[in-house]
Image: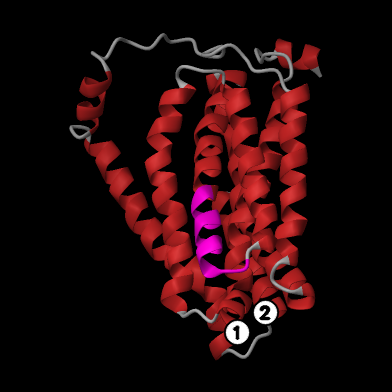
Amino acid sequence: MSAAASAKGMPQGALLALVLLTGLNLFNYIDRFILPGVQTLVQSEFRINDEKIGELTTAFFVVYMLTAPLTGWMGDRFRRKPLIVTGALLWSALTLTTGLVHTYRELYIRHALVGIGEASFGIFAPALIADYFPEAARNRFLSWFYVAIPVGAALGYGIGGFVGGHYGWRAPFYVAAVPGALIALCILFFMREPERGASERVLAADGGGLLANFAGLFRNPAYLASTFGMVLFTFSMGGISVYMPTFLVRFAGYSVSKAGLVMGGALAFCGLVGTG
């Protein structure tokens, strides 16, 4: 495999890295979407309304948003593989300990802290893949990495609904936590981090420093349009993704298990077709 990779201009171990990072991205989204699949059960146990259950996802995204600039800064200055492994082990541990919480406050804090671990992976992994694969092939391999998003989210709904419906809402978090930690350890011991910019043929120009580059983003119409479009998309789809399983249980009469499987199947189909 290394000879084939070298022949195509890829650093040694590029395909192994892609498989491991894609697998970790899969469990990143499985862990993230288990809660919507079981939240009617969580609401029942903790006796909380829709506003309170929605605040869990809000807390996650606020911490994610505040952490991302710091992790981006770290990614430019430190080795990214240890940062990925640390973040993955953190979110896997928090996913595992979700089954041990006994109050809404504990659940809130745990779900907020998951944003720290996931913000690190979401920033570092695509940068590593970009260093492994040359420009001509990079789009194709990044597509495989991002296919894990709809598939992982669909599995999160399905595992959450099916396992939670049969064994209680805590069980899916136990099931999903261990594989992510194992993949993180495989990355630690078996994945070689490429030299930063190893596959780039064009050197980055000096843009005049951090503040000048940041200010320049606001003079880039394409960047502003895509960013604000993504904000609006995330706002609308975020509400649907969080509350749709609950809607199916409450108004369509589905069981928790069926709601998770139906939502997961619909997301997998639409996500794969849309990505393709």
Residue 35: give x, y in percent of width and height: 60, 65
> In which quarter of the view is residue 227 placed?
top left
Q: Nearer the viewer, residue 3 or 169?
A: 169
Give the quarter of the figure containing the N terminus. Answer: top right
Look at the image and say whether residue 106 sits in the magenta stretch: yes
Tags 2 and 1 touching, CB below 8 Å: yes
Residue 249, numbered circle? 1
* In this picture, residue 67 sits left or right of residue 40: left
Instruction: Report the front residue among 110 and 73.
Output: 110
What residue is pinned by disc 2? 256
Q: Residue at x 72, y 72 (%)?
A: 164
* Residue at the spot 66% in from the left edge and 34% down from the top edge: 21
Extent of the magenta region: 102-113
**Is 6 located above or below residue 152 in the figure?**
above
Alpha carbons under labels 2 and 1: distance apart = 6 Å
Q: What main secondary structure does the magenta stretch of the protein show?
A: helix
Colouring scheme applied when the structure was drawn = secondary structure
- Which of the pair 157/225 is nearer the observer? 157
Residue 62, x across and y down, in percent: 39, 51
Picture residue at 27% right of the left edge, 45% below the top: 225
Q: Amino acid at mark 1?
A: Val
